[in-house]
Amino acid sequence: LVAMVVWISPPRRLLAGELMTGIRRTEFVAHYQPIIELSTGRCVGAEALIRWPRPDGSTVRPDHFIPFAEDHGMIGQITELVIGNVIASMKTALVEHRDMHIAINLSPEDVESGHFLTVVSDALKQTGVETSQIWLEVTERGFIHSDIARATLTKARVAGHVIAIDDFGTGYSSLSLLESLPVSVLKIDKSFVDAIGQNAATSLVTPHIIEMAHSLKLKMVAEGIE
Ligand code: G
Ligand code: MN
């Protein structure tokens, strides 16, 4: 048991420490994934995807440190950094292109705390960027405490944000729950897009998700169509 503890703890402590240092030094950068309107071929916006460049020249992808940050109570600070970074770097473009938006990813804990609401509104002050130009992406995991989620997302919607359900199809949200949330966009998960035309069971689900989006009158964004 002692050997196990020695074996397991140092790397975990190291990563938590590294992540804290990364937060303190604001080492994170956003990459922008364009969103293309298929009917016109026009770029209507982009999703901000966080990356963590390391001193050795490598880049850590979010699936390697976001879940860790969520488990170690650090995600709120990362979300705050992302919001500040995105608005500072994109404000000029957003003011020049009123019909474009940037989507920011939120973690379930952000939805729970609602702290991002003041962070975004403070960051937008004096920029000239409309609140509606900042979309917020929330995964179905963020709906688990549905009353809290509804309260936070309603505030965000009233402030003018567009709310998108991220990675749709990978969770278990019921139609009635979705209907009760102020959501206007459904992002269909890459796995369902990849399944189209494949002989997989998943490919049978894709048309149902699209149908669901239509009946809920949601806009659809498909991930992974590149
Ligand atoms: O960019 P990539 O496909 O590697 O992103 C992997 C996952 O990490 C995606 O599900 C994406 O939503 C998530 N992600 C990317 N950037 C952020 C971020 O700034 N905050 C949170 N909470 N998740 C992010
Ligand atoms: Mn996303």
Image: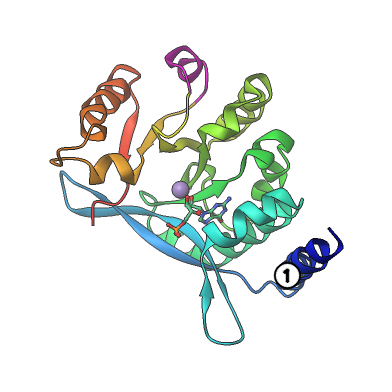
Residue visible at 77% across and 50% down in the picture: 73
Q: Quadrant of the N terminus?
A: bottom right
Closer to the camera, 178 or 42?
178
The percent position of residue 121, horizontal first and vertical second, equals 66, 46
| Residue 158 seen from this side | no
For residue 23, side relative to residue 124 (left or right):
right
Residue 6 higher or lower than 137, as above or below: below
Left or right position of 225 against 90: left
Coloring scheme of the render? rainbow
Give the quarter of the image for residue 123: bottom right
Residue range corresponding to the magenta coloring = 173-182
Specify the farthest residue to the right: 2
Instruction: Decide: is 144 above or below 123.
Output: above
Tell me what residue is drawn at x 49 percent, y 63 percent.
90
Q: Nearer the viewer, residue 189 or 31?
A: 189
Count of marks overlaid on the render: 1
Q: Is residue 157 left or right of residue 222?
A: right
- Residue annotated with mark 1: 11
- Using a 10 Å C-alpha cutoff, classify the residue at mark 1 as few (fewer than 14 neighbours), some (14 to 19) or many (20 or more): few
Q: Position of residue 154 (x, y in %)?
A: 60, 26
Q: Quadrant of the C terminus?
A: bottom left
Residue plotted at (76% across, 71% down)? 14
Q: Is mark 1 within 8 Å of ligand 1?
A: no
Question: Which element carries disc 1, helix, strand or loop?
Answer: helix
Q: Position of residue 141 (x, y in %)?
A: 56, 34
Q: Residue furthest bottom?
A: 56
Task: Give me the residue at 76% from left, 68% from top.
Answer: 7
Q: Amino acid at mark 1?
A: Pro
Q: Quadrant of residue 191?
A: top left
Answer yes or no: is residue 187 visible. yes
